[in-house]
Amino acid sequence: MKIAGLEQSLLRVRDFQLRTDPPLIVRLTALPLAFMERLRMKMPAPVQPQQTITQMGGKTTLVPDESDSPAAMRWRKEDHEDDIAVTAAIVHKALRGDQSITWESDPTKFKTHRDYLLALHKELEDAGFSSGEVSRIAKAVGEMSSLDDEGLAKAKGFLPETGKAP
């Protein structure tokens, strides 16, 4: 698709200051349309196991398994890893436009897409990123990717009503 008069991408790009000493500026790019849908096609979310309960009168119902069963414990671990992998995917995609950042992990070397994303998370960890810093980047990218005016204003660093930074 081409739009007359538009010479660049509609994806917003912004500088982002890491909390390092001295402060380091990286370049973030908003997530493209349907990024999360494509991610979920490559990496479906883990499904919580269900357990059957019998109510009075003999009616049975499926409910999420909140017990300490092996299946429930395995799901909790997979769900936690899934959260880490999704965050790594967001941060990796957001930093793709920053020429000063290179990644060592090769997606062709991993059995699953989740394993690749967990390796990217390990790279972030090895580079000294804290979980808080990764969360700040993911939040900023979410704001940049928002299509509402308030989200766009926050991504630019100010709120239009007040003119002040959030």
Image (cartoon, helix red, strand yellow):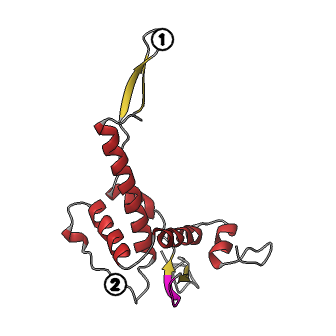
Indicate whether residue 34 is drawn in magenta. no
Taking the spot 44% from the left edge, 68% from the top edge, the residue there is 90
- 13 with respect to 66 (left or right): right
Estimate the x, y position of residue 9 in percent, counting from the top left.
Answer: 51, 80
Estimate the x, y position of residue 21 in percent, counting from the top left.
Answer: 51, 88
Taking the spot 32% from the left edge, 65% from the top edge, the residue there is 118
Q: Is residue 143 above or below residue 80?
A: below
Q: Nearer the viewer, residue 133 or 146?
A: 133
Estimate the x, y position of residue 137 in percent, counting from the top left.
Answer: 51, 73
Secondary structure of the residue carrying tag 1 is loop
For label 2, the crowd category at 10 Å Cα-Cα, with few meaning under 14, some 14 to 19 and many 20 or more, is few
Q: Which mark is residue 56?
A: 1
Look at the image and tell me whether residue 21 can be seen: yes
* Residue span colored magenta: 20-27
Q: Nearer the viewer, residue 3 or 66?
A: 66
Q: Which mark is residue 102?
A: 2
Estimate the x, y position of residue 28 in percent, counting from the top left.
Answer: 50, 79
Mark 2 is on which residue type? Thr
* Label 2 – label 1 distance at C-alpha: 60 Å
Secondary structure of the residue carrying tag 2 is loop
- 47 with respect to 94 (left or right): left
Mark 1 is on which residue type? Met
Q: Nearer the viewer, mark 2 or mark 1?
A: 1
Q: Quadrant of residue 61?
A: top left
